[in-house]
Amino acid sequence: MWESSHSVPALVPHEPHIWCVPLLAKEQQLQAWWTLLSSDEQKKAERYRFEKNTRQYIQARGILRELLGEYLNCSPRRIEFDYNTYDKPTLKPQSKLKFNVSHSGQMALLAFNWDDEIGVDIEDSTREIEIDVVAKHFFSPNEVTTLTALPLSEQQTTFFNCWTRKEAIIKALGTGLAFPLNQFEVSMKIGSPARLLATHWDPEEAANWYMASFSPAENYIGAFAVRAKVKDLRLWQWSGKEST
């Protein structure tokens, strides 16, 4: 399902691209990406408490700049970002090219699309989490009922199916967790297609969204969302440039 590529294919309207990136770069490559980052990005990287998080941020942000440079046909160093109230980055000056990034553990997802805002999320499904507590705080009553009725062996995966799909929605909206996750419902059972099922603010809203869910690597669950029609979703695996 994930196509490997050393080059960046053409991005066309209604055909978003998602790149899967293992965050396993060696020191030399990390230094190269560090030089691409703005001073603000470098300061943010240095604020992480743990070195592994700093390294993951540098790699994800460096590859984001490289891919944006390819899509926009410009130097990665020349790319500038604006941030909304909820810290979602956009291109400066404004561009029809939209993007979103998520990373967890040793994997990242980077999504790109023309015109319509998008959201992407990835989670390490093996990490320990208090499923009952988090679900009751963030999920809708129907989602909590669905989750808790399942066998314990299915609850971990089902929880992350729900969480990533909800995260993708709010990241597309650009609000982050400021938007209440219990105000909309998504499909979540293992094997169920990713769908926005209902929203509490507009019964017609769910029909406007496209969602997809996938496993880019073992023990990782990802989701993508856009409030638009999608003809084809292209999934790519980052292989680095041919010259590197």
Image (cartoon, rainbow, N blue to C red):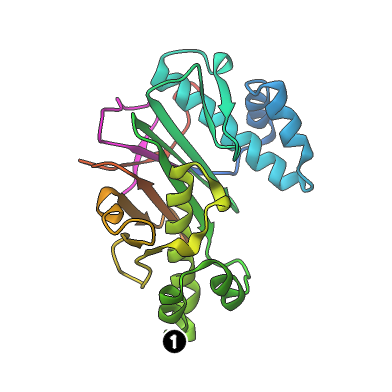
Q: Position of residue 208 (x, y in %)?
A: 27, 48
Camera sees residue 79: yes
Q: Which residue is mark 1?
A: 151
Magenta span dominant secondary structure: loop
User: Label 1 amino acid?
Assistant: Pro
Q: Which residues are magenta?
A: 1-20
Q: Is residue 230 above or below residue 145?
A: above
Which image quadrant is residue 16 in?
top left
Q: Position of residue 219 (x, y in %)?
A: 49, 63
Pick out the residue farthest to the left.
231
Query: Would residue 136 be counted in the magenta stretch?
Result: no
- Return the residue nearer the eye: 59 or 43: 43
Q: Position of residue 113 (x, y in %)?
A: 35, 33
Q: Position of residue 243 (x, y in %)?
A: 48, 21
Q: Residues within 10 Å of mark 1 (few under 14, many from 20)?
A: few
Label 1 element class: loop
- Return the residue nearer the eye: 106 or 61: 61
